[in-house]
Amino acid sequence: MATPGCYATGITLTLAPLAQQDVPFTAHVTALTGASGSGATPSSATHFPDRDGNVRPYKVLGHQHRPEIRQTLGTHVSLDFVPASGPWTRGIWGTAQIEWPKATDPNTVSSWYEEAYAGAPCVRCSSDRLPSLQPAVGTPFCDLGWKTDGSTLVVGFALDNLLKGAASQAVQNLNRMLGLPETAGLLTSPVSVST
Protein backbone atom coordinates (compact mmCIF):
# COMPACT_ATOMS: atom_id res chain seq x y z
CA MET A 1 0.00 0.00 0.00
CA ALA A 2 1.42 3.39 -0.95
CA THR A 3 0.83 6.62 0.93
CA PRO A 4 0.19 9.59 -1.36
CA GLY A 5 2.08 12.85 -1.09
CA CYS A 6 0.76 15.80 0.90
CA TYR A 7 -0.63 17.82 -2.02
CA ALA A 8 -1.94 14.63 -3.65
CA THR A 9 -3.79 13.79 -0.44
CA GLY A 10 -5.47 17.18 -0.08
CA ILE A 11 -6.38 17.63 -3.73
CA THR A 12 -7.59 14.06 -4.22
CA LEU A 13 -9.78 14.23 -1.11
CA THR A 14 -11.08 17.58 -2.37
CA LEU A 15 -12.03 16.36 -5.84
CA ALA A 16 -12.83 12.63 -5.38
CA PRO A 17 -16.54 13.05 -4.50
CA LEU A 18 -16.97 15.08 -7.69
CA ALA A 19 -14.94 12.63 -9.79
CA GLN A 20 -17.20 9.82 -8.52
CA GLN A 21 -20.13 11.50 -10.31
CA ASP A 22 -18.47 10.40 -13.57
CA VAL A 23 -19.11 13.79 -15.19
CA PRO A 24 -16.26 15.56 -17.01
CA PHE A 25 -15.17 18.74 -15.24
CA THR A 26 -12.24 21.12 -14.89
CA ALA A 27 -10.65 22.02 -11.53
CA HIS A 28 -8.31 24.97 -11.05
CA VAL A 29 -6.41 24.31 -7.81
CA THR A 30 -4.20 26.74 -5.92
CA ALA A 31 -2.59 25.43 -2.74
CA LEU A 32 -0.06 26.89 -0.33
CA THR A 33 2.32 24.93 1.89
CA GLY A 34 4.40 25.96 4.87
CA ALA A 35 8.19 25.80 5.05
CA SER A 36 8.18 22.17 6.20
CA GLY A 37 6.68 21.22 2.82
CA SER A 38 9.88 22.32 1.09
CA GLY A 39 12.08 19.62 2.59
CA ALA A 40 15.01 19.82 4.98
CA THR A 41 17.72 21.02 2.60
CA PRO A 42 18.52 24.68 3.32
CA SER A 43 17.72 27.03 0.46
CA SER A 44 16.12 30.41 -0.14
CA ALA A 45 12.82 28.52 -0.42
CA THR A 46 13.18 27.24 3.16
CA HIS A 47 14.99 30.21 4.73
CA PHE A 48 12.30 31.82 6.87
CA PRO A 49 13.47 35.44 6.53
CA ASP A 50 12.96 35.03 2.77
CA ARG A 51 9.53 33.41 3.30
CA ASP A 52 8.21 35.71 6.01
CA GLY A 53 5.39 37.87 4.65
CA ASN A 54 5.76 36.34 1.20
CA VAL A 55 3.94 33.87 -1.04
CA ARG A 56 6.00 32.27 -3.81
CA PRO A 57 4.59 30.02 -6.54
CA TYR A 58 6.74 27.11 -7.69
CA LYS A 59 6.51 24.21 -10.16
CA VAL A 60 3.40 25.80 -11.69
CA LEU A 61 1.54 23.17 -13.76
CA GLY A 62 4.52 20.82 -13.29
CA HIS A 63 4.44 19.67 -9.66
CA GLN A 64 5.47 16.04 -9.09
CA HIS A 65 2.14 15.20 -7.39
CA ARG A 66 0.06 16.24 -10.41
CA PRO A 67 0.37 12.88 -12.31
CA GLU A 68 -0.52 10.99 -9.12
CA ILE A 69 -3.64 13.12 -8.64
CA ARG A 70 -4.71 12.74 -12.27
CA GLN A 71 -4.20 8.96 -12.15
CA THR A 72 -6.35 8.67 -9.02
CA LEU A 73 -9.19 10.91 -10.20
CA GLY A 74 -9.51 9.62 -13.76
CA THR A 75 -9.24 11.04 -17.24
CA HIS A 76 -12.60 12.84 -17.09
CA VAL A 77 -11.12 15.34 -14.60
CA SER A 78 -9.05 18.17 -16.08
CA LEU A 79 -6.65 19.60 -13.48
CA ASP A 80 -4.67 22.83 -13.37
CA PHE A 81 -2.49 23.03 -10.25
CA VAL A 82 -0.57 26.03 -8.94
CA PRO A 83 1.42 25.21 -5.76
CA ALA A 84 2.91 28.00 -3.66
CA SER A 85 5.03 28.42 -0.54
CA GLY A 86 3.40 30.33 2.30
CA PRO A 87 4.90 32.23 5.24
CA TRP A 88 4.23 29.63 7.95
CA THR A 89 5.90 26.41 9.13
CA ARG A 90 3.33 23.61 8.87
CA GLY A 91 0.18 22.92 6.94
CA ILE A 92 -1.34 23.11 3.48
CA TRP A 93 -4.34 25.24 2.59
CA GLY A 94 -5.89 25.21 -0.85
CA THR A 95 -8.94 25.81 -2.99
CA ALA A 96 -10.29 24.17 -6.10
CA GLN A 97 -12.43 26.31 -8.38
CA ILE A 98 -14.53 23.91 -10.37
CA GLU A 99 -16.32 24.47 -13.64
CA TRP A 100 -19.20 22.04 -13.16
CA PRO A 101 -21.06 21.30 -16.41
CA LYS A 102 -24.51 22.12 -15.02
CA ALA A 103 -26.14 24.02 -12.19
CA THR A 104 -26.15 21.87 -9.05
CA ASP A 105 -28.15 22.31 -5.88
CA PRO A 106 -25.98 22.95 -2.77
CA ASN A 107 -27.73 20.10 -0.94
CA THR A 108 -26.75 17.70 -3.73
CA VAL A 109 -23.10 18.73 -3.48
CA SER A 110 -23.23 18.31 0.31
CA SER A 111 -24.69 14.82 -0.08
CA TRP A 112 -21.84 13.83 -2.43
CA TYR A 113 -19.23 14.81 0.18
CA GLU A 114 -21.15 13.42 3.16
CA GLU A 115 -21.66 10.07 1.42
CA ALA A 116 -18.06 9.87 0.20
CA TYR A 117 -16.60 10.51 3.65
CA ALA A 118 -19.24 8.99 5.95
CA GLY A 119 -16.80 6.22 6.94
CA ALA A 120 -13.63 8.31 6.80
CA PRO A 121 -12.64 9.13 10.38
CA CYS A 122 -9.81 11.48 9.38
CA VAL A 123 -11.81 13.69 7.01
CA ARG A 124 -13.97 16.50 8.44
CA CYS A 125 -16.56 18.06 6.13
CA SER A 126 -18.37 21.39 6.43
CA SER A 127 -20.91 22.57 3.90
CA ASP A 128 -21.28 26.22 2.93
CA ARG A 129 -17.88 27.36 4.25
CA LEU A 130 -14.23 26.83 3.40
CA PRO A 131 -11.85 25.57 6.10
CA SER A 132 -9.16 27.54 7.89
CA LEU A 133 -5.65 26.15 8.22
CA GLN A 134 -5.08 26.44 11.99
CA PRO A 135 -7.67 23.84 13.16
CA ALA A 136 -6.08 21.16 10.94
CA VAL A 137 -2.45 21.75 11.95
CA GLY A 138 -1.22 19.24 14.53
CA THR A 139 -4.02 16.77 13.71
CA PRO A 140 -4.45 13.70 11.48
CA PHE A 141 -7.43 15.33 9.73
CA CYS A 142 -8.07 16.82 6.33
CA ASP A 143 -10.72 19.51 6.64
CA LEU A 144 -12.94 20.06 3.60
CA GLY A 145 -15.54 22.72 2.92
CA TRP A 146 -17.42 23.98 -0.12
CA LYS A 147 -19.59 26.74 -1.52
CA THR A 148 -21.66 26.50 -4.66
CA ASP A 149 -23.53 28.96 -6.82
CA GLY A 150 -25.18 27.34 -9.80
CA SER A 151 -22.49 25.68 -11.90
CA THR A 152 -19.65 27.34 -9.98
CA LEU A 153 -18.26 25.27 -7.13
CA VAL A 154 -15.37 26.12 -4.81
CA VAL A 155 -14.00 23.42 -2.51
CA GLY A 156 -11.31 24.17 0.05
CA PHE A 157 -9.04 21.93 2.06
CA ALA A 158 -6.64 22.22 4.99
CA LEU A 159 -4.30 19.61 6.43
CA ASP A 160 -1.06 19.22 8.33
CA ASN A 161 1.45 18.24 5.64
CA LEU A 162 3.60 16.33 8.15
CA LEU A 163 0.67 14.41 9.66
CA LYS A 164 -2.33 13.84 7.34
CA GLY A 165 -0.02 14.59 4.43
CA ALA A 166 2.60 12.07 5.59
CA ALA A 167 3.12 10.34 8.97
CA SER A 168 -0.40 9.95 10.39
CA GLN A 169 -1.68 8.87 7.00
CA ALA A 170 1.04 6.19 6.88
CA VAL A 171 -0.08 5.00 10.34
CA GLN A 172 -3.69 5.00 9.15
CA ASN A 173 -2.70 2.83 6.16
CA LEU A 174 -0.66 0.49 8.39
CA ASN A 175 -3.65 0.13 10.72
CA ARG A 176 -5.82 -0.88 7.76
CA MET A 177 -3.23 -3.43 6.59
CA LEU A 178 -3.08 -4.95 10.09
CA GLY A 179 -6.87 -5.05 10.49
CA LEU A 180 -6.84 -2.45 13.26
CA PRO A 181 -9.20 0.51 13.56
CA GLU A 182 -7.95 3.21 11.16
CA THR A 183 -7.59 5.70 14.00
CA ALA A 184 -5.55 3.48 16.35
CA GLY A 185 -2.87 5.70 17.87
CA LEU A 186 -4.04 8.79 15.97
CA LEU A 187 -6.90 10.42 17.86
CA THR A 188 -4.91 11.75 20.76
CA SER A 189 -4.58 15.39 21.74
CA PRO A 190 -3.41 17.57 18.85
CA VAL A 191 0.32 18.05 18.50
CA SER A 192 1.18 21.48 19.88
CA VAL A 193 2.63 23.37 16.93
CA SER A 194 2.43 26.84 15.54
CA THR A 195 1.83 27.56 11.89
Image (cartoon, helix red, strand yellow):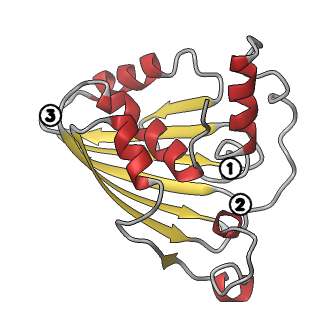
Mark identifier at residue 36:
none
Query: In the figure, is residue 99 to the left or right of 68?
Result: left
| 1 or 2: tag closer to the N-terminus | 2
Q: CA distance from mark 3 to mark 1?
A: 33 Å
Mark 3: secondary structure? loop
| 3 or 1: tag closer to the N-terminus | 3
Judge by depth and name the residue closer to the eye, 107 or 50.
50
Question: Do tag 3 and tag 1 residues touch (Cβ < 8 Å)?
Answer: no
Mark 3 Cα-neighbour bin, 10 Å: few <14, some 14–19, many ≥20: few
Judge by depth and name the residue closer to the eye, 187 or 77.
77
Three-letter amino acid code at the position of disc 3? Ala
Q: Name the residue: 64% across, 69% down.
A: 38
Three-letter amino acid code at the position of disc 2? Arg
Q: CA distance from mark 3 to mark 2?
A: 36 Å
Evaluate whether residue 186 shows in this view. yes
Mark 2 Cα-neighbour bin, 10 Å: few <14, some 14–19, many ≥20: many
Q: Name the residue: 29% across, 39% down.
A: 148
User: What is the quadrant of residue 176 in the picture?
Assistant: top right
Residue 112 screen position, x and y as percent? 36, 22
User: What is the quadrant of residue 189 in the picture?
Assistant: top right
Residue 19 screen position, x and y as percent? 30, 31
Three-letter amino acid code at the position of disc 1? Asp
Mark identifier at residue 160:
1
Q: For mark 2, what is the residue? A: 90
Q: CA distance from mark 1 to mark 2?
A: 6 Å
Mark identifier at residue 103:
3
